[in-house]
C-alpha cells in the first residue's frame, strides 16, 4: 500500500479519537452502573432546587419590574389652594431631578377612582356624606428606585400636606429575590460538592478497572489527552443524563404550577413557560456538564498520573 494511503488525515485521526473516547465513556457508564446512577441522581438533585430557585427568581423579577413601573409619588395638597398656587406647585415638582411627569388629580376625580376600585359591592355615597379626599399631584418618576429622595424633596415644598409612595413593597420584593437567589446558589454549591465527590469515586473505579490498559497505552506513546478523554466524556455524559432527568421533572412541574397559580391568583403576573423553560434547561445542561467534567478532572488529577 502506498505511503499516502497509510497516512490518515488530521480529521480522520480526530474522528477516530472521538469515537474511541465516546465508546469507552458509554462502556464505563454502563459498567459502573450503581456508581453512575448515584452520580446522575446526585447531579439531578443538585439541579432541581437550583432550577426551581431560578424559575422563582424570574417570576419575582417580573413582578418587581411591573411594580416598579407603577411606583409613583403622590403629593397631597392643603385644602383651599387656589388654581394659581396649584399650578405653581406643579411646576416646582416638575422641575425636580428624577421627575418625568406630574398630573393633578382633583378630589372629585380621586373619589371616582376609589369607587371604581371598590366596585359595585360598596357604595361610597351610602357611607360618607362629604368627600374627605384631598387634591393631589401624581408624580411619575424617571427611575422608580429614586422614589424616596423625590418624595423627600416634594415634602419640602410649601403647600404640600403629605407625601406617599409605594417603594416599600418593591424594596421588600427585591430583598426576597436576593435572599432566594443567595439560598439557591448556596444549596447548589453544597449539592454540587456532593456530586463532585461521587463523580470522582465513579471515575476512580473506572481508572482502577482499566489500569493495565492505560499503562499499555502510555507505553505505546498515547498522548495524555487521548488517555484522559474517555473519563472526561463519562463525566459529561453523567451531567447530560442528570439534566435530562431534571428537565423531565421541572418542565411539567412548572407548567402545572403555572396553571394552578393562574386559577388561584389570575391577576398575578407570571413568566410564560416558553419564555423561561428553554433558557432554564440550557442553563441547567451547561451546569450539569460543568459539574460532571469538573468531577472527572479532579479524579484524573488525583488518581491518574499522565
Image (tube, helix red, strand yellow):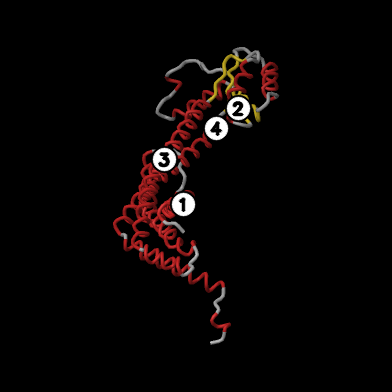
Residue 266's disc is 3
189 is higher (above) or lower (below) than 98: below
**Contact between labelled residues 1 and 2, with CB atoms less than 8 Å apart:** no
**Contact between labelled residues 3 and 1, with CB atoms less than 8 Å apart:** no
Residue name at image x 47 percent, y 48 percent = 276
| Foreground residue among 114 and 245 | 245
The alpha-carbon separation of the residues under discs 4 and 3 comes to 19 Å
Evaluate whether residue 281 shows in this view.
no
The alpha-carbon separation of the residues under discs 2 and 1 comes to 40 Å
| Residue 3 screen position, x and y as percent | 57, 83
Q: Which sits earlier in the primary sequence, circle 2 or circle 1?
A: 2
Indicate which label's residue lies in the foreground, 2 or 3.
2
**Element type where label 4 sits in the image:** helix
Residue named by callout 4: 70
Instruction: Using a 10 Å C-alpha cutoff, classify the residue at mark 3 as few (fewer than 14 neighbours), some (14 to 19) or many (20 or more).
Output: few
Q: Which sits earlier in the primary sequence, circle 2 or circle 4?
A: 4
Residue named by callout 1: 290
Amino acid at each position: 500500500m502506498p505511503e499516502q494511503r497509510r497516512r490518515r488525515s488530521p480529521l480522520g485521526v480526530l474522528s477516530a479519537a472521538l469515537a474511541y473516547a465516546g465508546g469507552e465513556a458509554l462502556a464505563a457508564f454502563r459498567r459502573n452502573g450503581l456508581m453512575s446512577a448515584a452520580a446522575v441522581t446526585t447531579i439531578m438533585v443538585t439541579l432541581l432546587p437550583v432550577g426551581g430557585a431560578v424559575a422563582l427568581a424570574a417570576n419575582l423579577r417580573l413582578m418587581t419590574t411591573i411594580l416598579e413601573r407603577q411606583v409613583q409619588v403622590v403629593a397631597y395638597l392643603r385644602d383651599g389652594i387656589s388654581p394659581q398656587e396649584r399650578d405653581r406647585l406643579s411646576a416646582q415638582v416638575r422641575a425636580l431631578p428624577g421627575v418625568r411627569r406630574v398630573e393633578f388629580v382633583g378630589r372629585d376625580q380621586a373619589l371616582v377612582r376609589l369607587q371604581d376600585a371598590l366596585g359595585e359591592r360598596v357604595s361610597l355615597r351610602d357611607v360618607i356624606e362629604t368627600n374627605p379626599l384631598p387634591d393631589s399631584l401624581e408624580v411619575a418618576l424617571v427611575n422608580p428606585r429614586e422614589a424616596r429622595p423625590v418624595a423627600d424633596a416634594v415634602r419640602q415644598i410649601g403647600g404640600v400636606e403629605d407625601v406617599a409612595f409605594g417603594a416599600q413593597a418593591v424594596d421588600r420584593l427585591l430583598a426576597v429575590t436576593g435572599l432566594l437567589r443567595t439560598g439557591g446558589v448556596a444549596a447548589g454549591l453544597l449539592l454540587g460538592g456532593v456530586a463532585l465527590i461521587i463523580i470522582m469515586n465513579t471515575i476512580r473505579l473506572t481508572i482502577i478497572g482499566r489500569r493495565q490498559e492505560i499503562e499499555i497505552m502510555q507505553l505505546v506513546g498515547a498522548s495524555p489527552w487521548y488517555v484522559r478523554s474517555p473519563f472526561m466524556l463519562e463525566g459529561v455524559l453523567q451531567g447530560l443524563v442528570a439534566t435530562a432527568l431534571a428537565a423531565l421533572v421541572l418542565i411539567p412541574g412548572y407548567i402545572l404550577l403555572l396553571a394552578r397559580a393562574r386559577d388561584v391568583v389570575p391577576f398575578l403576573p407570571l413568566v410564560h413557560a416558553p419564555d423561561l423553560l428553554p433558557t432554564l434547561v440550557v442553563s441547567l445542561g451547561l451546569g450539569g456538564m460543568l459539574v460532571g467534567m469538573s468531577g472527572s478532572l479532579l479524579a484524573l488529577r488525583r488518581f491518574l498520573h499522565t
